[in-house]
Image: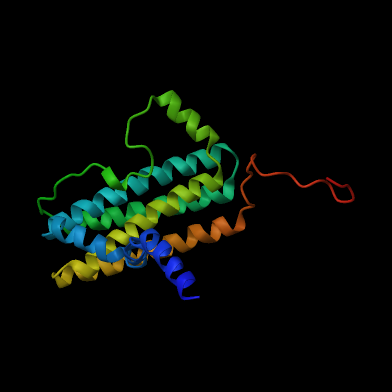
Amino acid sequence: MGKIMAARSSKSTPRGAKRPAARLERAHPKKSTAAKFRKRIRTPADFFAHAIAIEREAVARYTEFAQAMSDHGLDATASLFQRLARFEYEHLDSILKKTGNMAVPELSPGEYAWLDKGSPEAAAREFVFRLLTPHDALKIALQGERRARDYFAAIRESTADPAIRGLAREYAREEDVHIAWIERMLDQLPAPYHPSRKKLPPSGFSA
């Protein structure tokens, strides 16, 4: 019995040696994110530069998604995207007003980009949007909103500036509201079709 236990132990240790650290990192993603932003966000101008990039990307994508869904006659999803585009625009406008005469660097979407960071031909982009399903668009939006929420949550945890901490807390809450709306709409949609899944035979017939 002792030999069997020793054998099991020697086999499992090399395999699982790095797993605890990986599990810990997944369990506390905000810690590594907060450390990353602590180095990059040193001033209010840095914070607002990233927030503006996040909101501009959201406005642009929601506007595109709303138009794509409207073109497909998917009014409910189009309406949600229109509402989100309006809220994100109002949020962006509010941030820009807060910056006043502050010298805020202008950032590209970069890591906050919802779609490919490249610049595909207009025809190719139009083709992609013709194939875009409500489920696809909502999943892309959900990922974008979660990244935004995680950014603001990381700033809230890492900044020493109480004013920035308060704004980050407020903005993270707003992103949580948007996430809830998108998740609710996803729950209302039928499951997406997967051609690779084996279709069940009609009731009353054997496979």
Rendered image coloring scheme: rainbow
Q: Nearer the viewer, residue 103 or 155?
A: 155
| Quarter residue 114 falls in | top left
Q: Residue at x 34, y 55 (%)?
A: 147
> Residue 166: where, in percent of width, then height?
23, 71
User: On the picture, is 38 further left or further right than 19?
Assistant: left
Q: Residue at x 46, y 29 (%)?
A: 126
> Residue 65: where, in percent of width, then height?
47, 43
Q: Nearer the viewer, residue 9 or 152?
A: 9
Q: Residue at x 29, y 51 (%)?
A: 54
| Quadrant of the snapshot with the C terminus | top right
Figure check: 18 above or below 77: below
> Residue 123: where, in percent of width, then height?
44, 24
| Quarter residue 151 falls in | bottom left
> Residue 203: where, in percent of width, then height?
86, 51
Figure check: 76 above or below 133: below
Q: Nearer the viewer, residue 153 or 95?
A: 153
User: On the picture, is 44 further left or further right than 145?
Assistant: left
User: On the picture, is 24 further left or further right than 136?
Assistant: left
Is residue 75 visible in the rendered structure shown here?
yes
Q: How many marks?
A: 0
Q: Nearer the viewer, residue 158 or 75?
A: 158
